[in-house]
Amino acid sequence: MRPSLNRRLVARLAAGVLAVWLAAAGWMGWRALHEIDEIFDQMLVRTAAAVLATVPAEPMALAGARLPPRLLESDREAHRPTIVLRDASGRMLVDSDAFPALASDRRRPLRTVDYHDRRWRVLQRADAAGRYTIQVAAPLDERDEMVRRIATPALFALLGLLLLLPPIVYAGLRGGLSPLRRLTRRLVEADAPLVPTLTDARVPVELAPFTQAIDRLVGHLRSALDRERRFTADAAHELRHPLAALRLELDLAAGADAAACQQHLDRAQAALDRMHRLVGQLLLLARVEQAGELDDAGPLDLAALAGDALREVSERAAAGRIALSLDTDGDTHLDASRGLLGIALNNLLDNALRHTPPHGHVAVRVSGDAGGVRLCVDDSGGGFADPARLGERFHRPTGSVGEGSGLGLSIVQAIARLHRGRLAFDRSPPGGARVMLDLPRSGG
């Protein structure tokens, strides 16, 4: 049987109600017995006081009086107590039932004793002058009968309430869970691949966090799907051009002479190389964007990594007559991925060299403070014409040169997000572009 939230709630509420019912029934029974005990004892005390108030001052006067041998009778119907009156010497003066004398105990005038196969509640006390000793006794089965008469209707009422509670609780829970069933129907009846927004004014407060979490999840999925669709469309668009160029050059090479064929093959090789770079960057971007955390993070000196990256591009910069410089300031150590930050540095330097004219300058500065480490790459090129779109996939700024794919800054931005860092753009002092990568000490 599948788990049921409704059955679970009913079972737990029924267990709680049963426990409360048993506690209430036990408390009512105990309280009724306690109150009747007090009433019973008070009846014995008042009876003794009334009898002692009517007897003469001298026991001999009472002995000479013509009193019936049974002043009061004790029977189940009349519920009359048994009264025994004795003088100071123990001589019985009044005897409504020959109840035996008990040992005198001033601290405990009321006692429970067994007599003639019955349990009795007995009050034995002397008058103020010490001339008389009176016993007033009543059988406890009369008290038990009073308890039954009082407690039974109350217990039957509680039992009826207990029997009525399960269907009432079930109906209440079924009605209370109707918003959850309505929410389920909305999810089942949704025609779109992703359900619409679930949180509205009709959603109860208790379900609002749940629906809001689903809405956030659906929003993330919708954004991811939109990115993937855009990524696929852009990739197909970008790959179409080198593929068309490759096919065209190969077709032309098939019918050309040796010299022209070699030219067509060289251009086909260039298109193939561009497509190879594009596919490699696409795979890298997909891997970085899908990564949820850094698996290879470790201690790293960003200044040293920047020096290695500059040495790798030094020959290319020398060929283009571009000067390189590195400046460091403060503590540049952090926990980060050496491989990913190396890719980010190579992309930033590649962009800077691509847009810097001959006899230009590319300056790299790495500085650290208490908040983190900043990497700043300045060039003396033409700067950014449309900085608002920087970082978009396949976006190449106006005036771009070379065979760039427009994915370099997108990859750097994804690496920055993975390190919980930030990528910013500005104008460099020479008038070119400035790219700033801010990284926390412990990222990802």
Image (cartoon, rainbow, N blue to C red):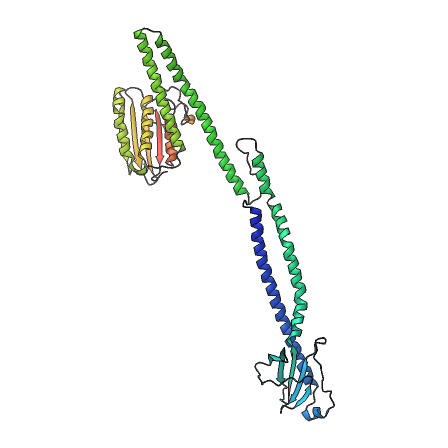
x, y percent for residue 116: 64, 80
Image location of residue 15, percent across then percent down:
57, 55
| Image quadrant where one finds the C terminus | top left
Displayed quadrant of residue 132? bottom right
Q: Is residue 170 above or below residue 406?
A: below
- Residue 168 at x, y percent in the picture: 64, 51
Res. 285 image quadrant:
top left
- Residue 167, can we see it? yes
Q: Quadrant of residue 412?
A: top left
Q: Is residue 298 left or right of residue 94?
A: left
In this picture, is 36 found above or below 133? above
Asked if one can make out residue 382 in the rendered structure from this viewpoint, the answer is no
Q: Residue furthest top?
A: 257
At horizontal 43% and vertical 21% (from top left) the residue drawn is 236
Task: Give me the residue at 64% from left, 51% from top.
Answer: 167
Horizontal side of 21 relative to 233 (left or right) equals right
In percent of width and height, residue 24 lies at 60, 62
303 shown above or below 77: above
